[in-house]
Structures are given as structure tokens and as C-alpha cells.
Image: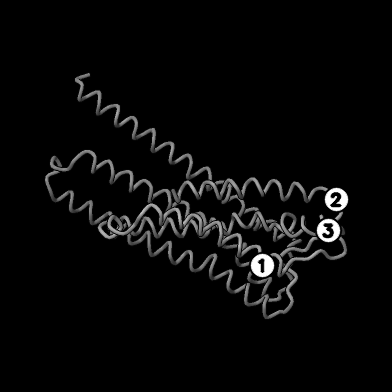
Amino acid sequence: MLIVNQNALDLYSCVFLIITYGMKLFNIDLTSSLGYWLCMFVLSENLLWCGVYGSFVNLTLIAIERYLKVVHPVWSKKHLRKWMIYAAIAFVWISSIIHQMAVAFEASAVINGACIGFAVWKSPVSRLAYGIFYFLAAYVIVLVIFVFCYWKMLIAIRRQARVMASHNTAGVSASQAQSNKIQSNLIKTMILVCAFYAVAWLPLNIYFLLMNLSLPLTFLDASYYSVLFIAFLYICANFQIVTVKRYLNAIKQLLVVTKFVSVSDGR
């Protein structure tokens, strides 16, 4: 369910990426009340970044959920319930919306008919504090969780593979072997996604941090759009990576089951 939610967040981000930058191509009058609200929600990229920020949080929850199921399988079967997953999904959407809305209305404004998003702070201290907080919360802490969880999972999977190899392989059920293979493929996919995240989002996060450190950088520089392109490439590619890998794994499973049934029937 969390991976499905990740697909939904990335799809949402892609849709609002098109809507946001499509509307920026038009010369919209922002001096009216309607223009102000368009600035606050769309032209400031507020709604777009709700999905992007939610994607960070959801990727972290996927890593934690996988970690609990692989490294602590007994505990997860006993305590991890389906309602907790649904609550986590709701938390991702609600927390990202509240966070982005609060920052957008605090640091965005319509000035001389132009929408200035996430760059109009009431005090330099607030700007600096948020810049450091965002860099730590949306990049450093997320990467630390990724490395810890997936490193522990790889160790657990290798240990389990050695235990299975030390026993009679004929005694290992086909369903157990298939389950382990599915688990391994899922972890490999998520490691690929997380590695792509670490590379693609580093330039933009550093740029945003330096801008909040009062360096002469703006959201209108060509360098900003260059690093933004790399980050948004991750959003679009991530949706395809997860979806395509899931379909390929499903086809492989179907072929294995079909072959097993054919052999059992003597065909």
C-alpha cells in the first residue's frame, strides 16, 4: 500500500508540475483577489511541492516498513496492522499539506503584480532556520534512514540465504523461496529509487540551503532551473521505475506459477 501511495504521490507531482508551469506561461493578472489565491496555491508551486514533500516522507516510511518486516519479522507480524499502514498514508498527505501551506503563506507574496513564492521572509533568522531545517529533514535525515534500514535488510537477507543454503534445499518450500525472491526484488527496486533520490536531489537542496544563507541566489537564475530539472527528472523517472519493475516482477511470478502448474499436470 505504501508503494501504491508512492506512485500516487509521484503522479500527483507530475500532474501539478504540468499545471503549475503551464499557468506560468500565461500573463495572469495577480492584482485581484483571485490572482492572490492563484499565487498562494499554484504559481508559488505550493500544491506541487505538497506532493514532492509527501514523496520524501513516504519513501522514508517504506524503508521503515520494509526494515520491520525483513529484520524483525516476528515483531511485525504480531504488532504491525493494516490500519497502521492506512494511518501512515493519511499522515503523509496531511503532514505534507500542512507543512507546505504554512511555509507558502509565510514566505510567499504578490509584489508589483508578480508572484514571489517561498522567498519573502519576515526576518533573516526565520529564513536561515527554515533553510537548515529543510536541508536536514528533507535530505540528510532521509538518507540516514535509507542507509540504516536497507543496510540492515541486506545483512538480514544474506544471513537468511546462508541459513537456507546450509540446510537441505529440497526441504525448502517453493512458496518460501518465491516469497524470499519477491522480497529481495522489492528491496533492490527501493534501493535503486533511494540511490536515484540521493543523487538527483542533492544539487537542488544545496542550492536552496545556500540561498537561505543569504547568498546572491534567486529562483529566477538559470542555475536554479538546471538543478530543478534534475530533481523533477527524479519525480517522473521514479514513477516509471517503480511501476515498470512491479509489472516485470508480476510477469515473472506469473510465468513461474504457469510453469509449476504445467509440470504438476504432467504437461
The answer to whether one can see residue 144 in this image is yes
Q: Is residue 75 depicted above or below 177 in this figure?
A: below
Which residue is depicted at the point 72% across and 54% down? Answer: 42
Residue 169 quadrant: top left
Measured as percent of width and height from the top left, residue 47 is found at 66, 55
The answer to whether one can see residue 198 in this image is no
Which residue is depicted at the point 71% across and 76% down? Answer: 214
Residue closest to the eye, 102 or 10:
102
Look at the image and tell me in which quarter the C terminus lies.
Answer: top left
Q: Which residue is mark 1?
A: 103
| Inter-mark Cα distance, 3 to 2 | 16 Å
| Within-10-Å neighbours for mark 1: few <14, some 14–19, many 20+ | some
| Inter-mark Cα distance, 3 to 1 | 20 Å
Q: Earlier in the sequence, mark 3 or mark 1?
A: 3
Q: Is residue 181 depicted above or below 139 in this figure?
A: above
Measured as percent of width and height from the top left, residue 239 is found at 53, 45
Under mark 2, the amino acid is Asn
Q: Which residue is mark 2?
A: 27
Q: Which residue is mark 3?
A: 33
Q: Does dot 2 land on a helix, a strand or a loop? A: loop
